[in-house]
Image (cartoon, rainbow, N blue to C red):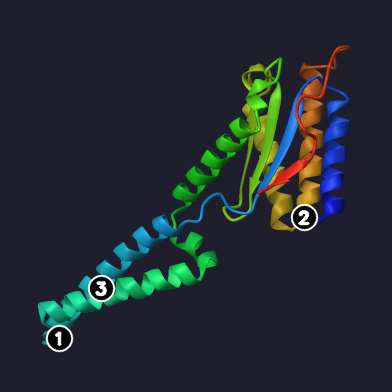
Amino acid sequence: MTPEEHARVAEAVRQAEEKTSGEIFCVLARASDAYFFPSAFFVTIAVLVVGLIVAFLLDYWWFSIGLPEFAALQFLGVLAALLVLWAFPAIRVHYVPHSVRRRRAHDNAVRQFLAHNIHLTGERTGVLLFLSMEERYAEVIADSGINAHVEQKDWDRIVALLISHAGRDRLAEGFCEAVEEVGALLARHFPPRPDDRNELDDHLVEI
């Protein structure tokens, strides 16, 4: 994102927080994991399975191959696959199941929530807007003071909004609209107080 887009998101956060005592924090991650080891595991399993299938077919067609040669071919196949994964990081995520990608992205969101002290606001009214591009994953994490008042379907709507804009390469617009939606929800349940102070930075963090 450009500096101008960062400034737009920061201004959206500032305006939203003027109407509530809650706090909004935004994080954009390019990826939530390097995925070398998960992809290496699944690719290795695939190479071994394919090798066994080929060996059975060769045997069926009366073409024999010795055990040492078969083991060497399996080893070379796994080694070649690992070298490709090491040389081309962008393809790793495509060899990892969606459930693993979602778990890694969720874990990253939780880490960001804790790392930026969103859980330490005075009234426990901090909200994290998190988007991880590689996994096409978005999540809203709200502290305990908020979750008791806001229904999950409201967070789901904001998550869908973020993902929709990200899919069209409109990251700044997605964060700005999501911040506005979160601000409206917080204003409904947590109006501003006279002694309210800004406890979290308003800018978007890009990692």
Q: Position of residue 59 (x, y in %)?
A: 13, 81
* C-alpha distance separating marks 2 and 3: 43 Å
Query: Compared with residue 179, is residue 39 higher up or lower down, i.e. above or below?
Result: below
Residue 129 image offset from top left, x and y in percent: 69, 37
Left or right placement of residue 155 versus residue 17 in this view: left
Q: Earlier in the sequence, mark 2 or mark 1?
A: 2
Circles 2 and 3, Cβ within 8 Å, touching? The answer is: no
Give me the C-alpha separation between circle 1 and circle 3. 23 Å
Q: Which residue is mark 2?
A: 1
Q: Position of residue 148 (x, y in %)?
A: 64, 17
**In-image side of 191 versus 119 (left or right):** right
Residue tagged 1: 61
**Residue name at image x 11 percent, y 85 percent:** 64
Residue 52 vs 29, above or below: the answer is: below
In the displayed structure, 174 sits above or below 13; it is below
Task: Give, as a three-letter code, the residue at label 3.
Answer: Phe
Q: Describe the element under mark 2 as helix, strand or loop.
A: loop
Give the mark, 2 or 3, whose residue is nearer the N terminus: 2
Residue flagged by tag 2: what amino acid is it? Met
Q: Residues within 10 Å of mark 1 (few under 14, many from 20)?
A: few
